[in-house]
Amino acid sequence: MADYSRSCEEYIATQEQEVASSGKKYGGLVPKKKPLISKIGPYASYADFDAAIEDLSACVKLDKDNKSAYTYLGLALSSIGEYRRAEEAHMKSIQLDPSFLESWAHLT
């Protein structure tokens, strides 16, 4: 279970470190396939979109101005077929920063 008392950036960084070290924890058993999408933070290589959605939803509740978290949330939602919610997440990111090209790119 995630510790949401930390900032979103700390939490995401910690999750990325855990994913990176998972090969050591599990005897080198890490997926050899490329991720289904190019990036959703630490969840991309495992395609655990439900966990990504849960964590990123908590993240944007904590930090309502985190444009990257909204973009990643949109990517995760899109990956499970929640296109309307994905569009809303990307639009929120664009609303926060109209020049944030990553959100625009994933909105199509």
Image (cartoon, helix red, strand yellow):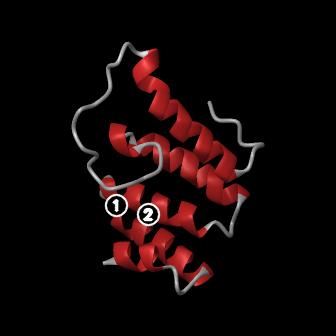
Q: Residues within 10 Å of mark 2 (few under 14, many from 20)?
A: many
Side of 2 relative to 70 (left or right): right
Q: Nearer the viewer, residue 104 or 49?
A: 104
Left/right placement of residue 34 relative to residue 95 reads left
Report the residue at 37% width, 13% height from top: 27
Q: Amino acid at mark 2?
A: Gly
SS state under label 2: helix
Q: Position of residue 19 (x, y in %)?
A: 47, 33
The answer to whether one can see residue 94 in this image is yes
* Relative image position of residue 5 (x, y in whole percent): 78, 42
Q: Which residue matches tag 1?
A: 78
Question: Is 35 above or below relative to 71?
Answer: above
- Give the amino acid type for the residue marked by disc 1 in the picture: Ser
Q: Residue 62: horizontal and vertical position, in percent?
A: 72, 56
Whether pointer 2 and pointer 1 mark residues with C-beta atoms closer than 8 Å, the reply is yes
Q: Residue at x 32, y 52 (%)?
A: 80
State whether residue 104 is above or below residue 32. Answer: below
The quadrant where residue 97 appears: bottom right
Location of the C terminus (image quadrant) = bottom left
- How far from the left and from the top, in percent, is residue 60? 63, 59
Q: Which residue is mark 2?
A: 74
Q: Is residue 5 left or right of residue 39?
A: right
